[in-house]
């Protein structure tokens, strides 16, 4: 039984079929990468899964539950966390506050309990803080704990966004281009963290990525997209040598190029 | 320079960061408590006015500074609080009941205006709240059987447990208590999931949603709490002015509240207090220097509103941190003393978010 299943999902913006009847599944504990040229519909698939876009047709199933029509704010609650391609952190809040916002879907404190800051609320806050500190320790962010996000370098922000997603304690983690804007060393570090997330935390990962070295390093299976359609699916090696994928990236037949 | 050594998560949840905070805020409270014994009726009244505006300012700060929503209709909430309180008092309901009812009723109005405007932001929200403000103003004028219309409404003298609050001193103390209450509530919100949700909505709606934050619910809550605090301020304002006229709650008053928030410093509760001081004391200052100004500037009509506008524009352009920003920089200069760096107080361009800038 797969953890996540997308069945014939499609979305159209006017006449453009951004995602066209895409079907794939992700098994528990695997790292599944989505590759493809720019505009292939990779991020659109992420926005469909996090319910920012409504799918025109098809169904999305997570953990045996159909969430095709779920409002976007409930998606975190069922255990799906995501990061964004162009970092969407809360820049005027400290790193710690950003991580604590990630704990929001686990907060059960009542309205009046928060207004009066009752002891129950205090205990809950300390629990959230402990979890956030675990993530800080896991990602080695201790020295930036009280720094405003706006004052952090890009590479660190990328890691903070990963940390904020981990604070949700997700079963499924969507990483939208985790290596974009990072240098070679930082990308390598990101690769190790994704491996750790898979092995130590047991979180299933779906990743959109352009850096093929990173894709090869961490993924169990890869799906290649172009113009919203699936070109190939399989191990990283199979997909990269698939003639359709080569054609999509290099454009046309090899002799045509020459 | 003070280094905080934290050994317990409770230290981060505490309202005071360190012993020094207890000392300085305690001292400030003691001074505020003995002011009426030392100063004349006029100054006590003026300071009471500052407290009332600070209460509304803190409420608007939650909405504008922390949730990132603008409101140009907060004078209407002040008016609703003022009329609800006064009308109930005139019907013989005791002040200890009318005050909280004024706050709760205005909060309900805030939620009601918040719900339909949730999909708006920036300029559109500003226009919608502006319209709301003028509608409520018209209701105050036309519903004369309750509000007295343009004849006005004489506010009855409130009594608390048999003590009549007829002078400025009584309202001063009640306002001080309400201000402290409102500050306490605000501090609690800001260290709870609710406050973090507001900050998240301000900084990035799309990612707030992905963190499991129900945007509509928290925007409505922010509107309600903000309106409720302004309603409390309104109830006190009624006793401060003693005679309610519907044209007191016009858009200029709303602009004064926005000035409190921007000039005080967006995103800081202290800023709301600084802003209230500024907004209440500037007219007094103008009154004092009016006669000494050259070329008859002091006699020109509209001097006060234009000065408010000018200061608002200058602050947004050159000092986005507001008075609170200046205060923080000054503090930093002294704590870091010979090691101030040029970059440590470099001007940051962070204009208020609007539709255009997205």
Image (tube, coloured by chain):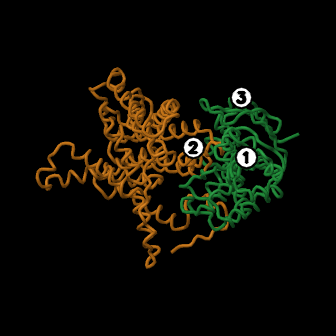
Side (left or right) of B152 relative to A241 = left
Q: Residue B5 occupies which quadrant of the picture?
A: bottom right
Instruction: Say which of B126 and B145 sits in front.
Output: B126
| Protein chain holding label 2 | B
Point out the residue furthest to the bottom here. Answer: B338
Q: Name the residue under label 2.
A: B205
Position of residue B36 measured from the top left corner of the image (x, y, whole percent): 34, 54
Mark in the foreground, 2 or 1:
1
Chain shaded green: A
Q: Position of residue A18 (x, y in %)?
A: 65, 36
Q: Which of marks 3 and 1 is nearer the N terminus?
A: 3
Residue located beneath label 3 in the image? A57
Q: Distance between the residues labelled 2 and 1?
A: 45 Å
User: Residue beneath label 1, please?
Assistant: A253
Q: Which chain is orange?
A: B
Q: Looking at the image, which is closer to me, B235 or B34?
A: B235
- Rendered residue at 66%/44% (across/down): A43
Mark 1 Cα shell of 10 Å, populated few (<14), some (14-19), many (≥20): few
B23 to B77, vertically: above or below? below
- Please state which of the two labelled residues, at mark 3 or mark 1, is closer to the viewer: 1
Q: Count the marks.
A: 3
Disc 3 element: strand
Taking the spot 56% from the left edge, 63% from the top edge, the residue there is: B17
Q: Which of B24 and B30 is in front in this view?
A: B24
Q: Where is residue A32 in the image (x, y as percent from the top left)?
A: 79, 48
Counting from the top left corner in percent of width and height, residue A7 is at: 78, 33
Determine whether the residue tagged by mark 1 lies in a helix, strand or loop: loop
* Res B323 → quadrant: bottom left
Q: Mark 3 lies on which chain?
A: A
| In this view, B281 is above or below A10 | below
Residue A195's disc is none
């Amino acid at each position: 039984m797969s953890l996540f299943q997308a069945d014939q999902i499609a979305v159209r913006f006017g006449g453009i079929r951004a995602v066209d009847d895409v079907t794939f599944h992700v098994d528990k504990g695997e790292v599944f990468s989505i590759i493809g040229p720019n505009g292939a519909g990779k991020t659109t698939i992420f926005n469909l899964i996090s319910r920012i876009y409504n799918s025109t047709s098809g169904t999305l199933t997570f953990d045996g539950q159909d969430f095709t029509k779920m409002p976007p704010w409930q998606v975190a609650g069922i255990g799906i966390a995501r990061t964004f391609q162009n970092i969407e952190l809360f820049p005027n809040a400290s790193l710690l506050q950003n991580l604590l916002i990630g704990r929001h879907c686990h907060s059960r404190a009542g309205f009046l309990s928060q207004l009066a800051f009752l002891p129950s609320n205090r205990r809950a806050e300390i629990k959230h803080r402990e979890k956030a500190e675990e993530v800080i320790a896991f990602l080695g962010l201790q020295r930036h704990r009280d720094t405003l996000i706006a004052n952090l370098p890009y590479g660190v922000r990328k890691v903070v966004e990963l940390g904020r997603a981990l604070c949700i304690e997700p079963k499924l983690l969507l990483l939208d281009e985790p290596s974009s804007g990072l240098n070679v060393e930082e990308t390598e570090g990101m690769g190790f963290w994704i491996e750790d997330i898979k092995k130590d935390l047991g979180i299933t990962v779906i990743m959109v990525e352009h850096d093929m070295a990173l894709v090869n390093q961490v993924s169990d299976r890869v799906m290649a997209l172009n113009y919203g359609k699936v070109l190939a699916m399989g191990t990283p090696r199979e997909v990269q040598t698939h003639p359709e994928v080569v054609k999509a990236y290099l454009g046309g037949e090899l002799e045509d190029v020459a | 320079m003070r280094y905080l050594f934290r050994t317990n998560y409770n230290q981060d949840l505490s309202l005071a960061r360190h012993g020094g905070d207890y000392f300085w805020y305690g001292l400030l409270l003691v001074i505020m408590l003995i002011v009426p014994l030392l100063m004349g009726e006029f100054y006590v009244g003026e300071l009471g006015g500052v407290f009332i505006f600070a209460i509304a300012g803190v409420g608007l700060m939650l909405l504008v500074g922390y949730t990132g929503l603008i409101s140009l209709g907060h004078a209407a909430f002040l008016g609703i609080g003022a009329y609800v309180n006064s009308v109930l008092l005139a019907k013989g309901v005791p002040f200890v009941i009318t005050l909280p009812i004024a706050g709760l009723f205005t909060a309900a109005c805030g939620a009601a205006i918040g719900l339909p405007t949730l999909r708006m932001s920036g300029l559109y929200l500003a226009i919608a709240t502006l319209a709301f403000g003028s509608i409520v103003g018209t209701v105050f004028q036309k519903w004369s059987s309750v509000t007295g219309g343009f004849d006005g409404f004489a506010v009855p003298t409130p009594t608390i447990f048999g003590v009549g609050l007829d002078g400025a001193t009584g309202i001063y103390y009640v306002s001080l208590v309400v201000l402290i209450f409102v500050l306490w509530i605000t501090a609690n919100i800001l260290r709870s999931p609710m406050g973090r949700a507001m900050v998240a909505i301000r900084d990035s709606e799309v990612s707030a949603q992905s963190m499991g934050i129900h945007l509509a619910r928290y925007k409505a809550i922010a509107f309600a709490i903000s309106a409720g605090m302004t309603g409390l301020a309104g109830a006190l304002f009624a006793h401060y002015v003693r005679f309610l006229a519907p044209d007191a709650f016009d858009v200029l008053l709303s602009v004064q509240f926005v000035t409190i928030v921007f000039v005080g410093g967006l995103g800081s509760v202290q800023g709301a207090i600084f802003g209230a001081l500024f907004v209440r004391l500037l007219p007094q200052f103008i009154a004092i220097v009016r006669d000494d100004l050259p070329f008859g500037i002091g006699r020109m009509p509209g001097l006060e509103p234009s000065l408010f506008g000018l200061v608002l524009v200058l602050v947004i352009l050159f000092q986005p941190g507001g008075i609170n920003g200046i205060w923080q920089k000054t503090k930093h200069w002294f704590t870091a003393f010979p090691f101030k760096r040029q970059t440590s107080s470099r001007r940051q361009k962070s204009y208020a978010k609007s539709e255009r800038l997205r």
